[in-house]
Image: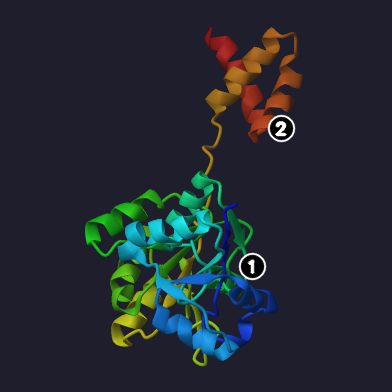
């Protein structure tokens, strides 16, 4: 019988955020697949655990993924961990989860720390509807193309960004969405120097041009406004009024109904209809 792949979140900064269930799962599995075993061993030492580990990261997902899946199919249980946060979210772990799903291997996701949810909750921007866009491309052309696709997005948008790419990304965000669009820049979340800077894209781009950024960032960008609906014209109203008259409505009643439906002045509609009849 196949084993189980457990997706175990790890603290994004504060070791106190690890839950009892997360710790118990790490203690119970047969082995751990880790983004960086040097980082994970520090967490295991903190918990007083020793476990066999293998590396599973972006550049070895082929060979390492096959090795993990083989052991799972042989009946072993595995915990997948990243250096910080929830595995398989903007992370190569999604490939391993897909392989397990295709092979009929059970996958259990343990709730826990996640930088994007932490940032969204503290951003001060709308949280009811949002879209997570992960890391933007390093290539300027590809980054601009990605942002152009989001130009009409009305939901709050979240991005992950590294400090060495931040200023270029902020310039592109400003140029795409405008300098007045609101943004919350969340860095070093749950760590000693945690900071949430709530400002506009124009001000953020200018600030970090003068103040070199430090730490990993989650960018929470305000969504756009809905497109303004085209206002109905008197000609639109007249067409609707004539249609109602064709259904047996009097001119007076039709003018009243169309004015209410389309937000047009009743007298102007009435006068336009009378004038139209005279023209005929």
Q: Position of residue 165 (x, y in %)?
A: 30, 73
Q: Position of residue 133 (x, y in %)?
A: 44, 59
Quarter holding residue 259: top right
Which colouring convention does the figure follow?
rainbow
The answer to whether residue 28 is visible is yes
Residue at point 63%, 23% (across, down): 271
Q: Is residue 45 above or below residue 58?
A: below
Q: Nearer the viewer, residue 120 or 59?
A: 59
Q: Secondary structure at mark 2?
A: helix
Q: Bin the neighbour count of mark 1 within 10 Å (Cα to Cα): few under 14, some 14-19, many 20 and up.
A: few
In the drawing, does residue 51 fall left or right of residue 240?
left
- The residue to which callout 1 is attached is 111
Q: Which mark is residue 260?
A: 2
Quarter holding residue 14: bottom right
Q: Nearer the viewer, residue 151 or 57?
A: 57
Q: Position of residue 156 (x, y in %)?
A: 53, 60
Q: Mark 2 and mark 1: span between their CA atoms?
A: 51 Å
Residue at point 71%, 32% (across, down): 260
Quarter holding residue 162: bottom left
Residue at point 56%, 28% (across, down): 234
Residue at point 45%, 77% (across, down): 83
Q: Position of residue 3 (x, y in %)?
A: 58, 58
In the drawing, does residue 213 fall left or right of residue 219?
left
The answer to whether residue 266 is visible is no
Of all residues, the one furthest to the bottom in this rendering is 192
Q: Is residue 169 above or below residue 102?
A: below
The quarter of the picture where the C terminus appears is top right
- Of labels 2 and 1, earlier in sequence is 1
């Amino acid at each position: 019988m196949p084993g189980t792949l457990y997706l175990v979140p790890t603290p994004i900064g504060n070791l106190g955020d690890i839950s009892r269930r997360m710790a118990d799962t790490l203690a119970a599995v047969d082995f751990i697949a880790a983004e960086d075993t040097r980082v994970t061993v520090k967490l295991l030492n903190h918990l007083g655990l020793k476990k066999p580990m293998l590396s599973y990261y972006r550049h070895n997902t082929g060979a390492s993924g096959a090795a993990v899946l083989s052991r799972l199919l042989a009946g072993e249980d595995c915990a997948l961990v990243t250096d910080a946060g929830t595995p398989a979210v903007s992370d190569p772990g999604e490939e391993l989860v897909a392989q397990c799903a295709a092979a009929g291997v059970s996958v259990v996701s343990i709730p826990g720390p996640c930088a994007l949810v932490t940032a969204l909750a503290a951003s001060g921007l709308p949280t009811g509807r949002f879209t997570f866009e992960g890391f933007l491309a390093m290539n300027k052309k590809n980054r601009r193309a990605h942002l152009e696709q989001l130009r009409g997005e009305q939901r709050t948008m979240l991005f992950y960004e590294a400090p060495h790419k931040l200023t270029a990304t902020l310039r592109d965000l400003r140029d795409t969405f405008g300098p007045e669009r609101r943004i919350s820049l969340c860095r070093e979340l749950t760590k000693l120097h945690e900071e949430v800077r709530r400002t506009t894209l124009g001000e953020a781009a200018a600030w970090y041009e003068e103040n070199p950024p430090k730490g990993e960032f989650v960018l929470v960008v305000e969504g756009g406004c809905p497109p303004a609906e085209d206002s109905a014209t008197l000609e639109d109203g007249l067409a609707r009024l004539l249609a109602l008259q064709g259904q047996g409505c009097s001119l007076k009643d039709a003018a009243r109904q169309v004015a209410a439906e389309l937000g047009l002045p009743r007298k102007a509609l009435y006068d336009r209809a009378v004038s139209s009849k005279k023209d005929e």
